[in-house]
Amino acid sequence: MSQSTHKLTILPHIIKWVPKDPAPVRKVISFDLDHTVIKPVKGRFSRTSDDWIFMKYGKTEVLAKLSAQMKETPDFHIVFFSNQGGVVSEPRTSKSCVKHVDKICKVLKYISENDSQLCDRIWIYCATKKPASLFGGSKAASTAHANKVVKNIISGQKKRINGTMVTPEMFDNVRKPNRGLFDEFLKDSDEQSDSIELLFYCGDAAGRPNDFSDSDKEFAKILGVPFKVPEEYFI
């Protein structure tokens, strides 16, 4: 499913949605995605590309809050940085990749139909899973050869995919709390910015007793910006 407001790029380690005609980037607020802004209708993980809803904190609806934020500060951009450990984007035809791309395109379409100004200020970066087939054994190699996807194996830990050299470290570097997703955003926004001020990062992985990790909190720490839990920002 295409998304007319954004350019979609699918790489072995990243899937990203970049505004097609972004305004100058000066100030940025950033968020995690799953269980911070959207969540499945039931359960922890989305079963289909339609299995998502915007979250609500108390009486505050996430989309309404973000729309109000943009009306108050129309020069802001909103960037989502998300680990997608269940999504394999090499090959991009994998079921998990197709489902995830379709889901996020539907989220963007919904935002665009409800607040086009907000949608034009949204950037999305997702770190995908390092597939065993990419750096695995003979079965993986034969499958890759049959599909003519992986060519020119430089070493056991480097492969050229569609003209790009891919290493295991690339997957690790973009996974939060490492800063690779933010660096990718800086690269993409370079032509639109002299300097970017990241005001805060907000996510649900804060290392609290019921949290699955502290990766969002540590991500903010590595970036050197204030950290907020969703309940702090949205209520």
Image (cartoon, rainbow, N blue to C red):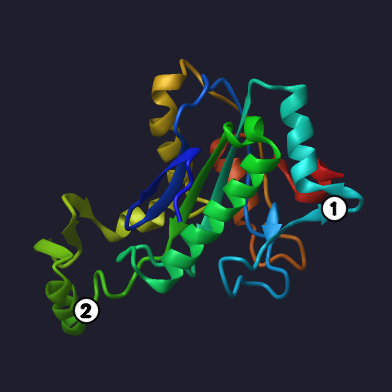
Residue 183 against residue 211 in the figure, above or below: above
At 41% from the left and 39% from the top, the residue drawn is 184
Q: Which mark is residue 140?
A: 2
Residue annotated with mark 1: 57
Q: Secondary structure at mark 2?
A: helix
Can you tell which quarter of the image residue 93 is in?
bottom left
What amino acid does circle 1 point to?
A: Tyr
At 71% from the left and 28% from the top, the residue drawn is 70
User: Horizontal and vertical percent for residue 188?
Assistant: 40, 32
Q: Which mark is residue 131?
A: none
Q: Residues within 10 Å of mark 1 (few under 14, many from 20)?
A: some
Q: Residues within 10 Å of mark 2 (few under 14, many from 20)?
A: some
Can you tell which quarter of the image residue 156 is in?
bottom left
Which residue is outermost to the right? Answer: 59
Residue 218 visible, this angle: no
Residue 173 visible, this angle: yes
Residue 124 against residue 39 in the figure, above or below: above
Residue 196 against residue 136 in the figure, above or below: above
Can you tell which quarter of the image residue 160 is in?
bottom left
User: Horizontal and vertical percent for residue 46?
Assistant: 61, 70
Q: Is residue 179 left or right of residue 36?
A: left
Front residue (pair 225, 143):
143
At 87% from the left and 44% from the top, the residue drawn is 235
- Circles 1 and 2, Cβ within 8 Å, touching? The answer is no
What amino acid does circle 2 point to?
A: Ala
Residue 189 against residue 180 in the figure, above or below: above
Please tell me which of labels 1 and 2 falls first in the chain: 1
